[in-house]
Image (spheres, coloured by chain):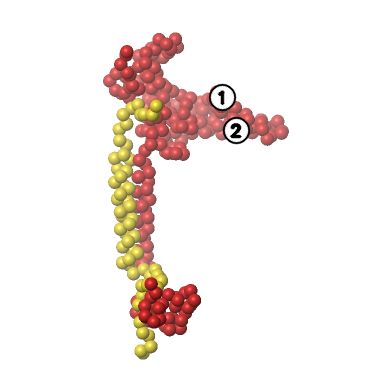
Chain colours: A yellow, B red
Amino acid sequence: VARQSHQKQTPDFYDKYGNAVLASGATFCVAVWAYVVTQTGIEWSLSPVGRVTPKEWRDQ
Amino acid sequence: MSKAVGWGAPRDAGWALPRPVEAGRSHEGAALEKAVGRAWRAPALWSLGSSAFSVTGLADPGRAAAAASREMFFRAAWSLVLRRGGLGSRGIHSPGDTAHSKGKMPPYTNYHAQRSYPMPDEPFCTELNAEQRALKEKEKGSWTELSHAEKVALYRLQFHETFAEMNRRSNEWKTVMGCVFFFCGFTALLIWWQRVYVFPKKPITLTAEWKAQQLQRILDMKGNPVQGLASQWDYEKKQWKK
C-alpha cells in the first residue's frame, strides 16, 4: 500500500517560493559571473594556441 | 458496509474533537528534573543500550558505575534537547531531510518526533477537554468497542503526525541551492570590486599587442618544439595546426 499523507498539507514557504529562489539565484550567479569573467579586464592567461595570431616583432 | 473513513481531518476541522482549552503551562523550571526523571523510565531499548555500553569494555566496576551515570546524564540531556526541540522544533535537521511541520503553539507540549525518535514520552495533546477526557477513559476499556473515528482521534491526541506525514519530502533544497547560487554570485561582485579598486595597473607585457609579438618570438625560437607551444604551430602554412 503506497504511503499517503492523511492530512491536507498547506503549502509551506519552500512550496511557494522554492522554485523562484532557485531560478533567480542560479540566473543571478550565471549572469554576474559571465560579466566578471569576460568584461572586467581580469587576466586569465589563457593559452594562445588556436586563439592568438602572432605579430611580427622585429620591425623596431 | 460502513463508508470508508480516512485518517480524518486535522484537529481543528469540523468533525474532530474541538481544540483543547488554552491554558498556561509553566514547565520551564522543572524541565531538567522531569527530563532526568524520564530518563530513568526511558524505553527499554535505550536503557538496554546504555547498560550494554557501560558494561562492555570496562573491567573496573567503579568506573563502570561512573560511566553508567555519565551515560544516563547524557541520555537525559539529549532527551531534554529533543523534547524541548533543542534549537527550536523547526531548527533540528535530521539526516535525510524531511519536511518541517509548523512549530507547535501552546497548549501543545514541546513534542518533537522524527524517524529516529518516533515515539516521544509525552503525548502530543496533554490538555484535553471533557470530550477528549471521556475518550481517554473509554480507551481504558476494551479497544474493540472504539469506533474507527475514535481510534483516529486517540491517535491524533497522542501523535502530531503519521509516519507518512512526518517523513514527507519537502522542497527545502530549492531554497538552499538558490541561496548557495546567490552567494556564489555575490562572490563575483566582490571579485569585480577587487579588480577595480585593488588590482594594480595591467603591465604592458599583458596587453594584446605585446602578447602577439611575444608569441611570434617564441615561435621563432621554436620554444618547446616536441610537445609544447611550437609543436602546435604549422610553420609552412603559418597558422595553428588543426
Residue A5 lies, in percent from the top left, at 35, 29
Residue at 68% across / 35% down in the picture?
B57
- Regarding residue B61, the answer to whether it shows in the image is yes
Mark 1: which amino acid? Ala
Residue at 38% across / 22% down in the picture?
B156
Q: Quadrant of residue B88?
A: top left
Q: Which residue is mark 2?
A: B71
On the rendered image, what quadrant is the C terminus of chain B found in? bottom left
- Neighbour class for label 2 at 10 Å: few (<14), some, many (≥20)? some
Q: Secondary structure at mark 2?
A: helix
Mark-to-mark CA distance, 2 and 1 = 15 Å
On the rendered image, what quadrant is the N terminus of chain B found in? top left
Q: Is residue B186 left or right of residue B54?
A: left
Q: Which residue is mark 1?
A: B44
Mark 2: which amino acid? Glu
Query: Is residue B93 shown above or below B17?
Result: below
Residue A10 lies, in percent from the top left, at 30, 33
- Neighbour class for label 1 at 10 Å: few (<14), some, many (≥20)? few
